Amino acid sequence: MNRVTIHRVTRANWRDALLLTVRPAQQRFIAGYAPIAAIILSKAYVGAEGMRWEPYVFVSEGEMVGLAALAAEPRHTDRRWLFHFFIDERFQGRGYGHAALAALISWVRKHHPGCQSLQLTVHPENHVAQRLYTGMGFMPTGDELDGEPVYRLALGESGG
């Protein structure tokens, strides 16, 4: 399995994060605009949707392999949202998605101990992502956000 670590996007690495991308056919699954990092950093800067955004990169063997954002609603400190999760097109199909998601879940458990759930939306046609998320324990809630089904992973004290 690929070893992946999670790092905040900072002044030192944000330009490299801008280079991360997906295949053109996948772009609509991740964000309406490219580069995706610019969208995430903009949301973090303006506090989009009234949330606090935390941009992260995933690194393996010293190289950025993916990107995501965690978002927290001020009135719901017991949950986090995962947005714009993706693995760079150069690293897809090699297990980095699973490793990055596992690293992110562990990071949330460690750094946000009061967080009871992690939620995300997934494009209804993105079957690869749906398999990844359900394989990691995310379950559809039956709700939708912006036309996409919401998935939830219970974290809790027992870890799931």
Image (cartoon, rainbow, N blue to C red):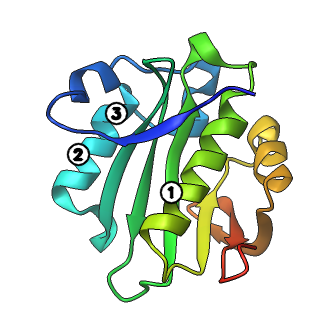
Is 121 left or right of 7, judged from the image as shown? right
Classify mark 1: helix, strand or loop.
Answer: helix
- Looking at marks 3 and 1 on the same chain, the residue that comes earlier in the sequence is marked by 3
- Looking at marks 2 and 1 on the same chain, the residue that comes earlier in the sequence is marked by 2
Quarter residue 9 falls in:
top left
Circle on res. 107: 1
| Image position of 86 with respect to 144: above or below | above
What's the CA distance linking mark 2 and mark 1? Answer: 23 Å
Is 88 left or right of 7, judged from the image as shown? right
Percent coordinates x, y for residue 65 in the rendering:
51, 23
Percent coordinates x, y for residue 153 in the rendering:
70, 68
The N terminus, quarter of image:
top right
Which residue was labeled with disc 2?
A: 42
Residue in the picture at 45% in, 37% down: 32
Amino acid tagged 2 = Ser
Task: Please state which of the two labelled residues, at mark 2 or mark 1, is closer to the viewer.
Answer: 1
Q: Are marks 2 and 1 in contact (CB under 8 Å)?
A: no
Pick the residue in front: 4 or 138.
4
Is 83 left or right of 156, judged from the image as shown? left
Amino acid tagged 1 = Trp
Which residue was labeled with disc 3?
A: 37
